[in-house]
Amino acid sequence: MIEKIQTLISKQNIDEKIAEIASMIEKDYEHKDIHFVCVLKGGVVFTVDLARQINKNVYLHFMDVSSYGEDTKSSGDIKILMDLDESIKDKHVIIVEDIIDSGMTLNMLKKRLLGRNPASLKICALLNKECNKTDNIDIDYLGFNIPDEFVVGYGLDYAQKYRNLNYIGIISFEEE
Ligand code: IMP
Ligand code: MG
């Protein structure tokens, strides 16, 4: 199979959107310290690019989670593969995620982190597949709504590949 990638969102469009989101966050957190919780691995490129556009101190935290697949609905929980190494109690936290599909993972992560008593907790996502929502989720800062296609690049992978593309593309497969 040959993997083909067709550009969906260009580097320039991503850069412009990140600048917009950064200035909104700067305004909203004018007198507050900002604590980003980056959801690994996909969120890492977006997190660092966004943080670099914010003209005040941004603390970076990293976390890796996975959902339990079909069981997640019933168990209502996620598996924490790598936890934060500092407390977020009384901090102003923004979860930074690459993409929201069903919304399940992020909803459960939000619940978990709220249990740690941050001063506030918001969600920032670069991409959202609107049509796939099984869970209601409030996205405080959103880059782009996208169609229900599998996308790669800018942190997002297919089989751990393509994370380093500087644009977002739709991947398709063709016979050799
Ligand atoms: P959700 O729990 O259904 O919202 O799943 C979101 C997670 O699925 C994201 O954090 C990604 O890791 C993964 N994911 C969903 N859609 C895509 C895609 O198009 N490309 C790459 N990863 C995706
Ligand atoms: Mg992810």
Image: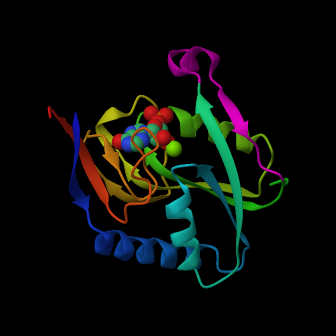
Q: Quadrant of residue 131?
A: top left
Residue 20 seen in the figure: yes
Q: Is residue 81 above or below residue 84?
A: above
Q: Is residue 119 above or below residue 33?
A: above
Residue drawn at 80 percent across, 55 percent down: 88
Q: Is residue 145 above or below residue 2?
A: below
Q: Position of residue 127 (x, y in %)?
A: 38, 52
The range drawn in magenta is 68-85
- Snapshot colouring: rainbow
Q: Check the image and name the residue furthest to the left.
A: 175
Q: Is residue 126 left or right of residue 78?
A: left
- 82 part of magenta stretch: yes
Q: Position of residue 38 (x, y in %)?
A: 62, 55
Please state which of residues 64 and 25 is positioned toward the viewer in this rendering: 64
Q: Check the image and name the residue furthest to the bottom.
A: 55
Q: Position of residue 107 (x, y in %)?
A: 57, 37
Please state which of residues 168 and 127 is positioned toward the viewer in this rendering: 168
Residue 137 seen in the figure: no
Number of callouts: 0
Quadrant location of the C terminus? top left
Q: Check the image and name the residue furthest to the front.
A: 176
Q: Position of residue 79 (x, y in %)?
A: 67, 29
Residue drawn at 84 percent across, 54 percent down: 86
Q: Is residue 70 above or below residue 160?
A: above
Q: Is residue 122 left or right of residue 117?
A: left
Q: Quadrant of residue 68?
A: top right
Quadrant location of the N terminus? top left
Q: Quadrant of residue 55?
A: bottom right
